[in-house]
């Protein structure tokens, strides 16, 4: 997953395969792949929408305009609006330092940035409970000052930042490393200052990788369940994000409403995939070398 | 880590960006994580040991490890086939299928969980077909396995795909001109080249499956000793306000996760060298 | 073994790579397919090897129709421009590969395979590198390993696609001299593709000049130089000083062959 844009921009040319498997083997393998993907991915995805509309459009609509549902949607958006830009700024800063300069411990730093991906979402929530909860290290001090982090919005935002922490950075680091420093150095030599260099030279070069990281970061931020579940306290209308709202409705056997809210999240996931593919396509197109005039086709 | 030997003397912002990176990394990740380890130090060794070897917790390790291993291996096989088919063959709708592989990355795990449950429960689309044959998926370890296959799939496919794409056609042509049949070419030339990537993908799928929570809790039914996964044990302890117990189990999981992360990094270094 | 191509046609999309090409390669000769890029020479070579299927026409080996035979059943040795060595195998295992994939009943014993590999390594003067991996070899060494690998299965035909194209000028010259002498030793029908006129003149018994998917002229180096059949051949060969090339050929082939070891 790391460095998709970087890889796309360095992918080799078209290869033609003349040695291949017999047609029946090819068809069998395609059938196996499609059946597997169908059973594991497609059928469940279709089920979300089918279950949501089981009792008709009216019930579907009602579930979405329910005040608790709207509160959950608002909280989810708020969380993403805070978490994504913070991780974006971090990702750009980290990749600038890592890709454009040499320093000892760089590989360790990259591994540490990846750390949140290795941690179970449940633990990602737990660490903040242990830090800021009523029985946590700073909990009593916070309580005296009436600052609520756990079972409140700040905890949800923190946990979301943690689980989406590496997304932008790990997309940008390989991309910026592959681009080197030549263009930035030329800009500096031509008299640009640091910010001009960044905004006019670096940023245009990394825009697709940046967008790609942001899109994936956003999808995870809006969809995170485990970590947020631990720190939220599940207070309806107050600390419920959309995935948590889905859980509550589901556990109350209110399946139509649960799947209705879930269908919004599924639509978001599909939209994410569409945008992601558009970005990949554009990045690939931008990186493709322009054919020279009069070049022989063979 | 802050010894500065600059790659470039001209470019500005090294101090600012590295400083911010280290600050943000410390505040969000390093300090909270190390606080967890420190916290577990407040437990006495026998307390810690009793918590992490409690029969119910041990049953959860068995399920988590067993199902994660099996899911990663199944993804290894089918993920390889999917990657192979996407790289090598053309068929209508291939672009769509390729895009869909990332669905588990994009779909919130809770949504995946309730969707899989709905489909594979005994009155669901597929569950109702399996029920007459005595196969129960939802609320059994099989359901846990299914959820873990779902979330691990893209790791395997997306790790193998670029390596398959970069395989030179000439290598296979050379094998063919030397008299190797397709199976010999696959097992003796292609597979050894792709193997490090395959192993990396399987290890990543395994690591992800171990920690997975959202998609599993809905389909597993969470029956003590039977279908409880280890992350759920942490939640259960927390709900009982047993912070020490939750921390102890979390530390066990973190140690395993970090070991896996180290292993995956070594694997990637190995496959990059090949 | 002789090779015959009859009425071969091949198109890639709208591009005609070969247009109704017919040619005989007599047994035991070293033939150069010479032409600019896009002339169809590599495509013809790949069709002879079975790596590419022609859209129309037939290939005969010793008069036997081989058109529908798989690459793996044609007993053709193929040497690729970029060597196509198996990275994860040692030099020894690369050369042994063709022998170890034979069906059990035809497969030589381990000892026989070992002997064969080492005699080939001696032939290409690399027996001291048997346990190295391709990444540890120079370009010239890799190409010689690729050649030894192709020869291991005792092919009836040896096909070489721009065999020296990826090498630097000095190594190129040495290797092509060496190929000429190797051919004089083993006499297997060999066809190599090149766009380098001097290379073709220096090495080949017969030169096939190709252009735009067709054959312009077939002849000995002297013939194509002194009696170009078409304006294209005259243009393509116009810069060559034939007497100098012939002189060099005589001199170099008479001299004892010496490959600087890290070639």
Image (cartoon, rainbow, N blue to C red):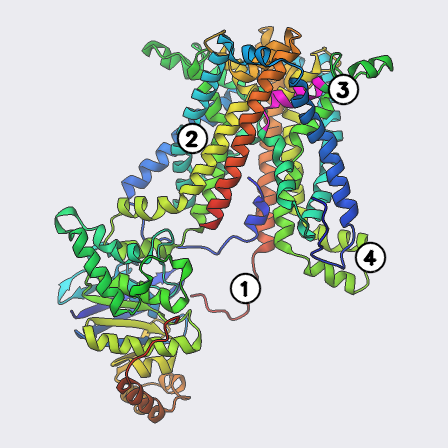
Residue B131 within the magenta-colored segment of the rendering: no
User: Over which residues does the magenta segment extend?
Assistant: A119-130
Q: Is residue C233 left or right of residue A197?
A: left
Residue C3 higher or lower than B250, as above or below: below
Judged by depth in the image, the label closer to the viewer, 2 or 1, is: 2
Q: Is residue C249 left or right of residue A207?
A: left
Label tally? 4
Label 1, on which residue? Answer: A291
Tell me the CA gap for discs 4 and 1. 35 Å
Q: Write down the chain letter for disc 1.
A: A
Of label 3 and label 4, which has the lower sequence position?
3
Q: Secondary structure at mark 4?
A: loop
Q: Secondary structure at mark 3?
A: helix
Label 2, on which residue? Answer: B75
Tell me the CA gap for discs 2 and 4. 50 Å
The disc placed on residue A193 is: 4
Marks 3 and 4 belong to one chain: yes
Of label 1 and label 3, which has the lower sequence position?
3
Marks 1 and 3 belong to one chain: yes
User: For mark 2, does the 10 Å Cα neighbourhood hold few (<14), some (14 to 19), or many (20 or more) residues?
Assistant: many
Q: Does residue A254 appear anywhere in the picture?
A: no
Residue C162 higher or lower than B31, as above or below: below
Label 3, on which residue? Answer: A153
Residue A125: x percent and y percent?
66, 21
Residue C171 higher or lower than C94, as above or below: below
């Amino acid at each position: 997953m790391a460095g998709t844009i970087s890889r796309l921009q360095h992918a080799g040319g078209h290869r033609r395969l003349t040695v291949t498997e017999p047609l029946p083997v090819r068809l069998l393998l395609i059938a196996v792949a499609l059946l597997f993907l169908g059973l594991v991915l497609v059928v469940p995805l279709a089920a979300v929408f089918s279950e949501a509309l089981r009792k008709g459009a009216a019930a579907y609509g009602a579930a979405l305009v329910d005040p608790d549902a709207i509160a959950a949607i608002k909280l989810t958006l708020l969380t993403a609006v805070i978490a994504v830009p913070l991780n974006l700024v971090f990702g750009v800063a980290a990749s600038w330092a890592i890709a454009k300069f040499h320093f000892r411990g760089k590989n360790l730093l990259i591994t540490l940035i990846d750390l949140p991906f290795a941690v179970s979402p449940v633990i990602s929530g737990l660490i903040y409970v242990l830090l800021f909860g009523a029985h946590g290290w700073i909990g009593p001090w916070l309580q005296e000052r009436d600052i609520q982090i756990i079972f409140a919005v700040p905890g949800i935002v923190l946990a979301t930042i943690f689980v989406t922490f590496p997304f932008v950075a790990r997309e940008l680091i390989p991309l910026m490393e592959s681009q080197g420093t030549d263009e930035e150095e030329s800009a500096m030599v031509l008299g640009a200052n640091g910010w001009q260099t960044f905004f006019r030279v670096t940023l245009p070069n990394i825009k697709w990788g940046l967008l790609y990281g942001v899109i994936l970061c956003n999808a995870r931020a809006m969809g995170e369940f485990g970590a947020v579940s631990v720190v939220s306290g599940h207070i309806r209308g107050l600390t419920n994000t959309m995935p948590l709202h889905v859980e509550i409705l589901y556990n109350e056997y209110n399946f139509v409403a649960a799947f209705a809210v879930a269908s919004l999240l599924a639509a978001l996931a599909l939209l994410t995939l569409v945008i992601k593919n558009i970005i990949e396509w554009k990045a690939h197109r931008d990186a493709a070398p322009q054919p020279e005039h009069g070049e022989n086709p063979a | 880590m802050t010894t500065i030997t600059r790659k470039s003397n001209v470019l500005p912002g090294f101090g600012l960006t590295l400083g911010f990176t280290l600050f943000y990394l410390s505040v969000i990740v390093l300090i909270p994580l190390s606080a967890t380890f420190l916290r577990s130090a407040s437990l006495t060794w026998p307390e810690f040991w009793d918590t992490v070897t409690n029969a119910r917790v041990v049953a959860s390790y068995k399920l988590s490890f067993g199902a994660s291993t099996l899911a990663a291996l199944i993804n290894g096989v089918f993920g390889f086939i999917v990657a192979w088919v996407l790289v090598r063959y053309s068929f209508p709708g291939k672009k769509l299928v390729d895009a869909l592989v990332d669905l588990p990355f994009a779909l919130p795990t809770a949504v995946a969980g309730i969707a899989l449950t709905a489909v594979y429960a005994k009155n669901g689309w597929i569950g109702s077909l399996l029920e007459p044959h005595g196969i129960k998926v939802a609320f059994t370890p099989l359901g846990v396995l299914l959820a873990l296959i779902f979330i691990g799939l893209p790791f395997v496919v997306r790790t193998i795909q670029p390596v398959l794409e970069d395989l030179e056609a000439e290598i296979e042509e050379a094998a063919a001109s030397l008299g190797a049949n397709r199976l010999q070419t696959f097992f003796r030339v292609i597979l050894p080249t792709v193997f490090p990537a395959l192993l990396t993908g399987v290890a990543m799928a395994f690591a992800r499956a171990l920690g997975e929570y959202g998609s599993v809790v809905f389909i597993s039914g969470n029956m003590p000793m039977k279908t409880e996964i280890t992350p759920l044990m942490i939640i259960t302890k927390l709900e009982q306000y047993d912070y020490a117990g939750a921390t102890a189990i979390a530390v066990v999981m973190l140690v395993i996760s970090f070991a896996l992360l180290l292993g995956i990094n070594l694997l990637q270094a190995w496959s990059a060298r090949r | 073994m002789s090779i015959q191509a009859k009425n071969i046609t091949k198109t890639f999309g709208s591009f005609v790579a070969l247009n109704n090409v017919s040619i005989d390669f007599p047994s035991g000769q070293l033939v150069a397919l010479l032409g600019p890029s896009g002339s169809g020479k590599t495509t013809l070579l790949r069709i002879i090897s079975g790596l590419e299927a022609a859209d129309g026409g037939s290939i005969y080996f010793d008069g036997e129709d081989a058109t529908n035979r798989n690459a793996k059943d044609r007993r053709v040795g193929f040497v690729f421009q970029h060597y196509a060595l198996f990275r994860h195998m040692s030099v020894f295992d690369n050369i042994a590969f063709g022998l170890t994939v034979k069906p059990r009943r035809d497969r030589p014993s381990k000892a026989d395979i070992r002997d064969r590999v080492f005699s080939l390594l001696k032939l290409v003067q690399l027996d001291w590198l048997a346990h190295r991996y391709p990444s540890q070899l120079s370009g010239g060494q890799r190409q010689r390993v690729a050649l030894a690998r192709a020869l291991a299965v005792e092919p009836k035909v040896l096909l070489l696609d721009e065999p020296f194209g990826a090498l630097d000028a000095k190594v190129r010259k040495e290797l092509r001299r060496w190929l000429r002498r190797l051919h004089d030793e083993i006499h297997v029908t060999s066809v190599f593709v090149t766009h380098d006129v001097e290379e073709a003149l220096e090495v080949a018994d017969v030169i096939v000049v190709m252009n735009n998917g067709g054959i312009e002229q077939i002849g000995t180096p002297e013939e194509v130089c002194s009696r170009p059949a078409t304006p294209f051949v005259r243009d393509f060969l116009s810069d060559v000083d034939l007497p100098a090339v012939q002189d060099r050929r005589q001199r170099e082939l008479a001299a004892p062959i010496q490959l600087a070891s890290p070639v």
